[in-house]
Image: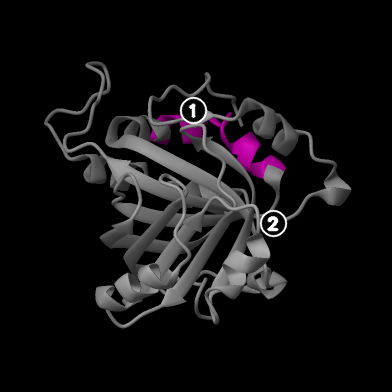
Amino acid sequence: MTEAPPLKHKYGRIDKDYAMALATRAPEDDGPIYMVNLMKYHEVAQYTDDAGVDKPISGREADDRYNPSSILGKIGATIVFVADVVGNHVGTEEWDRIAIVRYATRKSFIDMQTRKDFGEKHVHKAAGMQRTIIVCCRPEDPSLDSRGRPKTEDDRLVAMVVRRTENRSSAFAALPGATNLSAEGTIIGDGRTWDTVQFVPVNSAGDTESLAKSLTPASEGDTYVMTVRASMDAITQG
């Protein structure tokens, strides 16, 4: 596969030290990693004049054009969760969409960035995305690694909690029955490093609001709580 030029974007800062750690992980210590994507779109996609897009489209439409499913399949990665955000309850910013990709190895995620076919698709992500955070996680329950690609006709409401915390055990204990992910790094973001990501099925956005109120108050900028409507979900269901 021909290598593409370095990817250009303005949607977040790369943690170069963590990227190097991903790229140089010894094979015997490598394995599946979950990339949790929090996404906020431009109202109108910001394409360059030479991008070949003949009419204005929304940032969400640009991200739909980006959809890297075919490339992910080639490298053994699987999309395990896709959801639209229907309620932003706690957090200093709002988000539009969530996606989680399970890569077979950390190195495969880094290698994908240099693929020519990925670079060609990435033009759409760069145009559509206003900002993004990508939290790199391992599940508390390793059996998540063996779950296959979920159905595409799911329609489930899920509460999602993302936190910066020095005590992951307490964060996990605060949400009984949650699917818990521990972050080992934040590869793209705004400089903050996130520590835990949790998912709890709910019946309504009101349930998420109640859940948010039950959490120990955190410093501003340390927690996101969202209600998301999942169209693909191999995280909270087997």
Q: Is 120 in the magenta?
A: yes
In the image shown, does 189 or 60 lie closer to the viewer?
A: 189
Q: Residues within 10 Å of mark 1 (few under 14, many from 20)?
A: some
Amino acid on which the number 1 mark rests in the picture: Arg
Q: Residues within 10 Å of mark 2 (few under 14, many from 20)?
A: many
Residue 57 position within the rendered picture, expressed as x and y whole percent measured from the top left: 16, 37
In the image shown, does 8 or 38 lie closer to the viewer?
A: 38
Residue 73 position within the rendered picture, expressed as x and y whole percent measured from the top left: 55, 54
Say which mark, if any, is on residue 32. Answer: 2
- Secondary structure under tag 2 reads loop
In the image shown, does 109 or 120 lie closer to the viewer?
A: 109
Q: Identify the residue at image location x=62%, y=48%.
A: 75
Question: Magenta part of the protein: which range?
Answer: 107-121
Please indicate, yes or no, whether residue 219 appears anywhere in the rendered image: yes
Residue 128 position within the rendered picture, expressed as x and y whole percent measured from the top left: 28, 36
Q: Is 69 in the magenta?
A: no
Residues at circles 1 and 2 in contact by the CB criterion of under 8 Å: no
Q: Identify the residue at image location x=48%, y=70%.
A: 199
The residue carrying mark 1 is: 13
Q: Identify the residue at image location x=55%, y=80%.
A: 176
Q: Identify the residue at image location x=46%, y=54%.
A: 218
Please indicate, yes or no, whether residue 77 appears anywhere in the rendered image: no
